[in-house]
Image: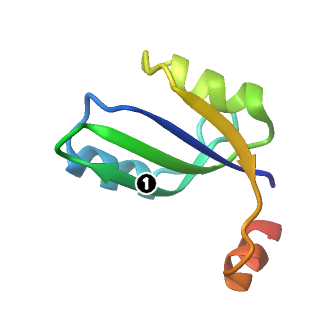
Amino acid sequence: MPIFLDVHKVPFSEDNLRELCKSPPDEFGVSHVNLFYNKESSVCFCLLHAPDLDAVEKHHKKVNIECEWITEVTNIVNDAFKIEQAK
């Protein structure tokens, strides 16, 4: 499944973000791989598995989050992650 990276402001707590990473895929097929969070500026970088860009946009829209940008990425370094995403 494709991997996407996005950035946006976050109205959630750090605990909420941890829970998101444990959540199953949503109705759009989006699941969180990891979140990178800067508490001081309330900015979150999301690494997501998703079928396509449209699914990522819908995933954020349902909780009224506007992304500054979203891009499809390829994981170059972590071969174990590549294996997991193929399952």
Question: Is residue 37 visible to the viewer in this orientation of the structure?
Answer: yes
The amino acid type of the residue labelled 1 equals Leu
Q: Residue 48, relative to residue 42: is it above or below?
A: below
Quickly name the residue at label 1. Answer: 35
Rendered image quadrant of residue 59:
top right
What is the secondary structure assignment of the residue under circle 1? strand
Residue in the foreground of this view, choosing between 13 and 23: 13
Count of numbered circles in the view:
1
Residue 16 is situated, as x and y percent measured from the top left of the image, at 27, 44
Q: Residue 87, relative to residue 10: is it above or below?
A: below
Q: Residue 54, relative to residue 36: is it above or below?
A: above
User: Is 32 positioned to the left or the right of 56 in the image?
Assistant: left
Residue 30 is situated, as x and y percent measured from the top left of the image, at 64, 42
Residue drawn at x 32%, y 55% as measured from the top left:
18
Q: Residue 60, relative to residue 19: is it above or below?
A: above
Residue 60 is situated, as x and y percent measured from the top left of the image, at 52, 26
Residue 37 is situated, as x and y percent measured from the top left of the image, at 32, 51
Residue in the foreground of this view, choosing between 1 and 75: 75
